[in-house]
Image (cartoon, coloured by chain):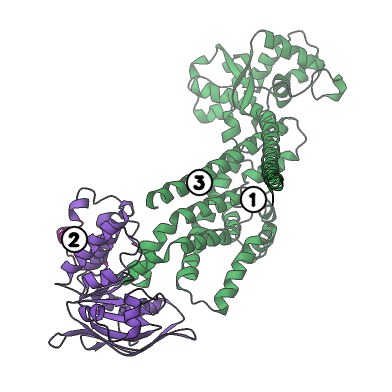
Amino acid sequence: MNNKEKEIFLRKRYSAEKRFRFFGISSIIIALSFLCILLINIFTNGLSAFSRTEILLKINFNEKKLGINSSSTDKEIKQANFDEVLQDALLSLAPNAPELKQAELMDLVSIDATTELKKFYLKNKDVLNKTAEVAVTLSDDIDQVHKGNFPRDIPEDRRRFSDFQLKIYDEQSSKNKIISEFNWPFIFNADSREPEIAGVGASLMGSFFTLIVCLLLSFPLGILAAIYLEEFAPKNKITEIIEVNVNNLAAVPSIVFGLLGLGVFLNYFYLPRSTPLVGGLVLALMTLPRIIIPCRAALKAVPPSIREGALALGASKVQTVMHNVVPLAMPGTLSGTIIGLSQALGETAPLLLIGMVAFINVVPSTPLDPSSVLPVQVYLWSESAERGFVEKTSATIIILIFFLAFMNSFAIYLRNKFEKKWS
Amino acid sequence: MKNQKIKISTKNLNVFYGAKQALFDVNLELEEKKVTALIGPSGCGKSTYIRCLNRMNDVIDICKVEGSIKIDGQEINKKDVDVNLLREKVGMVFQKPNPFPKSIYDNIAYGPRIHGLADNKNDLDQIVESSLKKAALWDEVKDRLNQPGTGLSGGQQQRLCIARTISINPEVILMDEPCSALDPIATAKIEELIDDLKKTYTIVIVTHSMSQAARVSQNTGFFHLGKILEFNLTEKIFKNPDNKLTQDYITGRFG
């Protein structure tokens, strides 16, 4: 090879290197841009759901209209009818409105408005027979207009609110009577048919209970199985078959576990339908191999010299494993478990089959109460027609992504922290 | 060699890894409170041999040990021998320092704890201190007993492992190339230590370093292809070996 040939050869090598770098960087950019599009889309759609729109109404808490007096008990107040005072306040927004339009005035506020008035009154009993300005949740249509999610220039017959309602809204808006607040009810309320008062509280609790059941079952079982298989089981045909099947189980489509849960837990053991208990059981089945596999890998990665060191000191097999091997394998196991759980948190299909797709309008207080979970809530709301549910769907995804990111970063944190400590 | 008490004796020791035979009829008698060095080219079976003495070969599924191994006249190559008690008596230090991922204190305290050698915290503190002193490590680590043992230097780690081994007061210490991963200064420290320990313990050391064998041992055995070719006083082996192969190996002509 003469000098010239060598130069060409070198140049080829360098250009091949450059090409490879270019392809590598471009694939990363493409992947990142997909992620960005997804996140931007979800956040632009969903962020507005974290605020809610209210109207300040002058309510006259007249004791005759309410049918209560200053000595009424809380129970009597709860049974009292606040519709009339609310109506009066709404009618006063457009005193000369014809009777036909009066119904439209009523529709400006949420159907939950009277309950809000009751709550306000229970807290401020001194307003009896006085007029007070109370913030009342607007209906979801006006809420969407206020957030700019609904174009107001389309013809009246093709939108869910009338020109008259729009005019009232604009009037109140210019008087600064329309206010925005952080949407706490979205976090704490259960699902509802009315978008303005629907919340993810029930599915948050449902997801929480489901994950707890799943963790309590799959973590000890998975770890014990992994430790036994890796450290104690003799290496023969049977353990080989078990090993292959654990790996197969991890690849089984999740909906199959749902069918199994339906067939076994619901139809055979008669466990309560739609509950986090059954959901957790099903997800535990699914998570089990996903814990066993990383746990075994972590055990395998513990250097044999540690085992020999303990055995040579006269430690028994169990002592060697429990005192010296398992602690070293813990970070890998824990991060594997957390990643398995975060997969379980995002799982939808198997839960549909065991009835966790039902419309649940109370927040569950135990794992035995019917409940929904976050991803199923996304599924349910994505099918709803009301404009208000569009932002709620995305907002629920934001909450879900938040928890997933939190759990996964915690897993990475655990891994880094413990690996550094002993290496 | 005449008036010495024999601590360990092996008769017709044969070891198989699956179908492959690693040791052939090894007959050796190791003296009490002496350092016996085992030398020989790689793969000659010297590590396999010392791993028989505390039954560490049990860990390897395919390994089969046949023949007689007696410590203080007691057969240990039998099914009903409790290996945990045997290993309490016969400690081992490995080629690569392998401190537990625990604090320096807990590394030493681990053995006494699992064997119930300390009645209270005071006893344990004392065992830890005396073990570290015997291993000539105390002065270097006494102020940081709670720091991880893995944070020490290689030579310190190996001395920690030696301290760990003597913490349970064994009678025999097996050393499998204890200095091969260490620098010359650390090696010198360990050799000094071995010299000191032989007053109390019977030591069997596998080594690749001729000079080390010459320096630390009283008796030397030369292994070749799974057989013991020559076993004698170290001085004799290094000055005037009987076997031609031993001579060649020691002078560096093969191996």
Disc ID at residue B124: 2
Q: Residue at x 72, y 14 (%)?
A: A169
Chain identifier matching the green colour in the rendered picture: A
B91 drawn magenta: no
Magenta-drawn segment = B114-137
Q: Is residue A367 visible?
A: no
| Dominant SS in magenta | helix
Is residue B119 magenta-colored? Answer: yes
**Relative to A379, residue B84 above or below:** below
Q: Are marks 3 and 2 in contact (CB under 8 Å)?
A: no
Answer whether residue B196 is visible to the viewer in this image.
Answer: yes
Q: Chain B's shade in the image? A: purple
* Element type where label 3 sits in the image: helix
Q: CA distance from mark 3 to mark 2?
A: 37 Å
Where does label 1 land, which residue? A347
Q: Residues within 10 Å of mark 3 (few under 14, many from 20)?
A: some
For mark 1, give the secondary structure: loop
User: Mark 3 highlights which residue?
Assistant: A412
Callout 1: chain: A
> At label 2, which amino acid type do we have?
Leu
Q: Pointer 2: residues within 10 angstroms few (<14), some, or many (20+)? A: many
The kind of residue on which mark 3 rests is Ile
**Relative height, residue B90 to residue A375 (above, below):** below
- In the rendered structure, the answer to whether residue B56 lies left or right of residue A264 reads left
Chain of the residue on which disc 3 is drawn: A
